[in-house]
Amino acid sequence: MKRKGTADAGTKKRDNFLHQSLFMPKGLPDGAELAYFVKGQKFIQKLIEGYKQGSGIVCGCCERELSPSQFEAHAGMADRRQPYRHVRTSNGLTLHDIALSLSNGQRITTDIGDDMCSICGDSGDLLFCHECCQAFHPACLNLGHLPEGDWHCANCADGNGLGRKAVSGESSRIARPIVIRLTRVVKAPEFEIGGCAICREYDFSSTTFDDRTIIFCDQCEKEFHVGCLRDSGQCDLKEVPKDKWFCCDDCKRIYGALQSSVSNGVQIIPTSFSNVIRRRHLEKGLFINEATDCVQWCILSGKSHYPEDLPLLSSAAAIFQECFDPIVAKSGCDLIPAMVYGRSISGQEFGGMYCVVLIVRSVVVSAGLLRIFGREIAELPMVATTREHQGKGYFQALFACIERFLSSLNVESLMLPAAEEALSIWTEKFGFTKMKEQQLMNYQKQLQVTVFKGTSVLVKKVQQIPNNSVNLPENFPSE
């Protein structure tokens, strides 16, 4: 009996170490749907459900973050003391099963509903990578025919040493990834959003053109009743505009400037921004070559469909997916591709989203997503630098380009969602402050601002920059 107890203790200790991998990088992604099940005589019963967040499980009934043991107790099963063998994901695997698979080299991917090509952003007949599950049009890969068997994209083929054999479509022995469905992690407003920007009413006419017909501004995305526009003296519309419509001169000017910037393409960044990159290279003892003197930036629009922009958009999407967990809508689809390519998904419209990238030797090293809601406010919901190029000053240069551009448009404020670990960087180095709840609520009622669970919304006044200069923060830590 004593040996049995010793063996059980050893097994439990090994299991505890094994289960830690679920909450480590490359473990179970935040947003993974989880539920506690008990096995009855005839069927398995689900007691409570939630989703993985950080190092715990957020309960679906009380929104509290609990440890697996607390989640089990919350289900009324504290006496079992085996949460990892009774908490299951949406595909039926227990947490213990997944931990074992991770220890054997399997990886986790998410069922992100990849219905867009990773290169061009369009849908259609797609080819899926066996390893990372990214989707591609065969034509975008210059494939003359569909490969047979398990196919791997170039990145996965190179990473696994599969070479031409895997790319050509021959079957491999790589274990298929564990597919996990994610729950929504985009924070939904706790009140009704939208409504006429003038009267704040939500009614509208959908079949006839009359005073209650709703018109959307093509820049700030606010909505207006036709009758309210006339009564307020803004404009007297006789029919739905056939072309773009703007609620004010500022929105029209900003839209024109954005379209002009997209058309202008790649631009060399100012010398003062290049000097920041050179200084960071010197501080880190990195080799400096001509690349630090010809860093470029540009503004991209996924809706413009410029062929030369598609590789840059694809690279930006790859950087976001490298640096962030999937940002999941209610439908289970990852929002990152939709945001990059300016698509509508799960009732959320990202047509006004632009992608800003920094380019070194034809390689995108840093990227951000920018949406301008008129002159009053703009948002930067996502910004990232590829891990290979972090700490080299590229993010500072990209942010400076963005702020200088906003200043040229006379945009007053910039807001962004920041994770807890990044708060000090944004507040101490870039001058952001936490946005007041009432101010955020007012914006959310009028605009489709992007807020993620587990983040704080920050805001700062945009520098009014004379002579195209900008104050760059000193001693900025690794991006």
Image: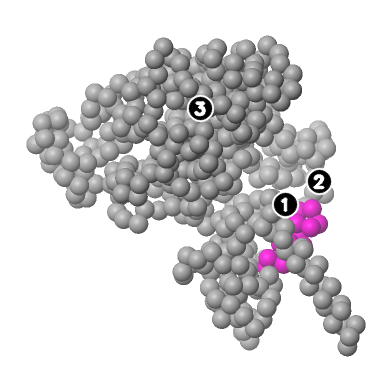
Q: Earlier in the sequence, mark 2 or mark 1?
A: 1
Q: Nearer the viewer, mark 3 or mark 1?
A: 3
Q: Label 1 sits on what residue type?
A: Arg
Residue highlighted by disc 3 = 399
Q: Depth check: give the residue in front, 343 or 269.
A: 269
Residue highlighted by disc 2 = 172
Can you say whether 291 is above or below 241 in the image?
Answer: above
Local packing at callout 2 (Cα closer than 10 Å; few below 14, some 14-19, many 20+) is some
| Secondary structure, magenta segment, majority class | helix
For the residue labelled by badge 3, is the local secondary structure a helix, a strand or a loop?
helix
Q: Label 3 sits on what residue type?
A: Phe
Report whether residue 135 is seen: no
Screen quadrant of the N terminus: bottom right
Identify which residue is drawn at 57% across, 64% down. Answer: 57
Q: Which residues are magenta?
A: 94-106
Residue highlighted by disc 1 = 107
Residue 466 is situated, as x and y percent measured from the top left of the image, at 39, 15
For the residue labelled by badge 2, is the local secondary structure a helix, a strand or a loop?
loop
Can you say whether 336 is above or below 243 in the image?
Answer: below
Q: Depth check: give the residue in front, 164 or 148.
A: 164
Residue 441 is situated, as x and y percent measured from the top left of the image, at 32, 49
Q: Label 2 sits on what residue type?
A: Ser
Q: Depth check: give the residue in front, 101 or 464.
A: 464
In-image side of 262 versus 227 (left or right):
right
Q: Nearer the viewer, mark 2 or mark 1?
A: 1
Mark 3 → mark 1, Cα distance in angstroms:
34 Å
For the residue labelled by badge 1, is the local secondary structure a helix, a strand or a loop?
loop
